[in-house]
Image (cartoon, rainbow, N blue to C red):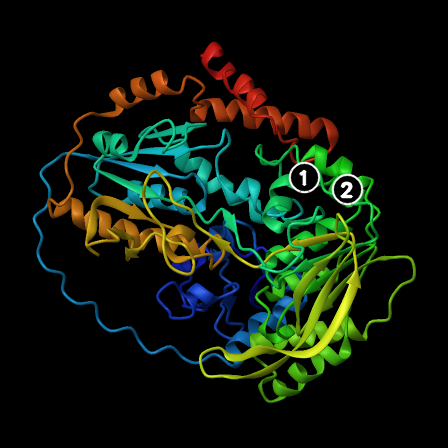
């Protein structure tokens, strides 16, 4: 018997360190870890000890005899990885670190701007370092914590959201202060953070979307997937948006996991969505939706798609939903990967080919996967009425294996809604600039660099997507945070950090004066309990509060009762 990693794998790698026989890969020390869509257990090496099951924060690991029809394919996926895995070159022995002076200061203070996975992993890594007395202040501009766990992960992925339990333990530590509903750059300056802390870690993600840059993109009915996801997940800044769901067809441009999330939500049906924590306003609107078909359009083929095999497989188990594909659009990929049938990329092409071969069930809603197409114009007179696509062909590319080149063939698709899901980019925060193609904070292993001199900015660090760009999954942030924290701790011991002029109590007083509406973690626990109680009353995981004033009012009960 062997254990199997399934869909909800977060790549946290907590399982790797507890495996006694080193049969879970890729590990954070292996080159492919940052690009891996999930972790895999070697079916030959596994000794069925169960240590990984206990360590997994999202219950993604099961014994092979507990696989269900929905998860049975993961036995093949795990085995496929090892059938074609290149054995990693053994890591070189780490260089002997130069002796550094250990700081004589008894403790140090770190501010973390952003409460999503990267910020929470950074906090836990700091707090877990033996011999260090650390105080952490976490700042979040929204009135609810945990970033993409609450506002990005699809509502039907409750298993993935379970990782929040790890972050709740971090937030509950006595030497951690949460400052929710406090925006750095508005209520506090960067310099004020450094006046109260030895260092500041920016963990603000990549909140801005990328545009298509085509005519008609700004027509009513054309939106970014970022806006749509924030709307159905109850983000306060997007809760009052409206989306026209009166047409029968929508088109999603992009081939990543978010594109599939959006497509699933559009066709899921009210009965399925009522089992989730989708925002109430979105549930009501989607219950009245007339959308019957969603096209998901990618510029290259299925083997090159950015979505993962787990997300692709999950489409096939949506109740009342057909998944279709055009046979001619996948034929080239199926042929080109025939000699590498065991690769993870080839598996994507095989799964899509299976979708294409399935006969449609009349009357069901449909997701249609389209490939080798790029948008050139959003059509409509005053609002979206359709989209024009150009046919691509793949040509060899030394860097990426292949690239899409447009032909002269175009196709028009009628639709009433267009959602673009073509990437994310960072934005400047509190005067810290971003640059480059991915709009990240220029950094060296997490040390933020001055854009003029190229030298590290004293006491300024970064983690997550604003550090490395929008790549990886939730657990990828753990290793990313560890790299940054290593640099920060080295700088502290080497005396490169300036001791703060003020401390914890002074900061509390400053924030109370600047932002009386601040919510601490005790306040959030009251809000969380309130949402869960509403959820129990309606048979849902929780009912999210989406109005900031209401969230503040509920959170204030922690103060009045305490």
- Residue at image position (48%, 10%) is 560
| Residue position for label 2 | 286
Give the numbered dot on residue 278.
1
- Residue at image position (67%, 39%) is 278
- Residue at image position (58%, 68%) is 1
Quarter of the image holding residue 212? bottom right
* Residue lying farthest to the front in this orientation: 381
Q: Position of residue 108 (x, y in %)?
A: 20, 36
Which corner quadrant holds the C terminus?
A: top left
For the question of whether residue 442 can be seen, the reply is: yes
Can you say whether 322 is above or below 448 in the image? below
- Residue at image position (61%, 50%) is 224
Between circles 1 and 2, the one closer to the viewer is 2
Quarter of the image holding residue 87? bottom left
For the question of whether residue 68 can be seen, the reply is: no
Q: Position of residue 518 (x, y in %)?
A: 43, 22
Asked if residue 232 lies left or right of residue 364, the reply is left
């Amino acid at each position: 018997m062997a254990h199997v990693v399934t869909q909800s794998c977060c790549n946290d790698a907590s399982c790797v360190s507890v495996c006694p026989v080193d049969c879970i890969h890729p590990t954070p020390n292996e080159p492919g870890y940052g690009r891996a869509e999930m972790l895999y257990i070697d079916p030959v090496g596994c000794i069925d000890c169960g240590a990984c099951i206990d360590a997994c924060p999202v219950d993604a690991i099961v014994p092979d005899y507990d696989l269900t029809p929905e998860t049975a394919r993961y036995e093949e996926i795990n085995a496929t990885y090892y059938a074609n895995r290149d054995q990693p070159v053994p890591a070189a022995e780490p260089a002997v670190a130069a002796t550094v002076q250990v700081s004589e200061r008894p403790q140090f203070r770190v501010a973390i701007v952003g409460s999503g996975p990267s910020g929470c992993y950074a906090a836990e890594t700091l707090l877990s370092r033996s011999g260090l007395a650390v105080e952490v202040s976490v700042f979040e501009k929204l009135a609810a914590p945990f970033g993409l766990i609450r506002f990005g992960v699809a509502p039907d992925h409750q298993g993935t959201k379970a990782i929040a339990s790890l972050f709740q333990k971090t937030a509950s530590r006595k030497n951690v202060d949460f400052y929710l509903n406090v925006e750095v750059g508005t209520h506090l300056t960067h310099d004020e953070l450094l006046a109260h802390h030895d260092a500041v870690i920016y963990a603000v993600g990549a909140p801005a979307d990328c545009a298509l840059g085509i005519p008609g993109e700004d027509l009513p009915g054309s939106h970014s997937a970022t806006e749509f996801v924030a709307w159905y997940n109850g983000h306060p800044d997007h809760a009052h948006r409206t989306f026209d769901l009166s047409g029968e067809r929508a088109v999603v441009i992009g081939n990543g996991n978010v594109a599939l999330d959006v497509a699933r939500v559009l066709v899921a049906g009210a009965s399925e969505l009522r089992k989730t924590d989708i925002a109430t306003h979105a549930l009501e609107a989607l219950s009245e939706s007339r959308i019957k078909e969603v096209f998901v359009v990618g510029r290259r083929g299925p083997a090159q798609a950015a979505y993962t095999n787990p997300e692709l497989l999950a489409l096939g188990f949506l109740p009342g939903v057909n998944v279709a594909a055009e046979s001619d659009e996948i034929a080239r990929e199926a042929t080109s990967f025939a000699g590498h049938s065991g690769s993870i990329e080839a598996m994507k092409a095989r799964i899509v080919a299976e979708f294409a071969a399935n006969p449609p069930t009349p009357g069901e809603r449909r997701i249609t996967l389209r490939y080798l197409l790029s948008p050139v114009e959003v059509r409509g007179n005053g609002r979206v009425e359709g989209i024009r696509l150009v046919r691509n062909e793949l040509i060899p590319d030394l860097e990426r294996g292949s690239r899409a080149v447009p032909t002269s063939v175009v196709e028009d698709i009628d639709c009433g809604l267009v959602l673009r899901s073509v990437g994310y980019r960072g934005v400047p925060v509190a005067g810290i600039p971003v640059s480059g193609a991915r709009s990240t904070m220029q950094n060296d292993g997490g040390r933020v660099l001055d854009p003029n001199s190229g030298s590290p900015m004293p006491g300024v660090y970064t983690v997550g997507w604003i550090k490395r760009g929008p790549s990886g999954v939730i657990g990828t942030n753990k290793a990313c945070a560890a790299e940054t924290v290593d640099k920060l701790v080295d700088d502290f011991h080497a005396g490169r950090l300036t001791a703060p002029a003020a401390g914890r109590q002074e900061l509390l007083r400053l924030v109370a004066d600047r932002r009386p509406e601040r919510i601490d973690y005790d306040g959030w626990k009251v809000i969380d309990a309130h949402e869960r109680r509403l959820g129990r009353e309606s048979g849902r995981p929780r009912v999210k509060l989406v109005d900031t004033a209401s969230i503040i009012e509920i959170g204030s009960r922690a103060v009045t009762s305490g």
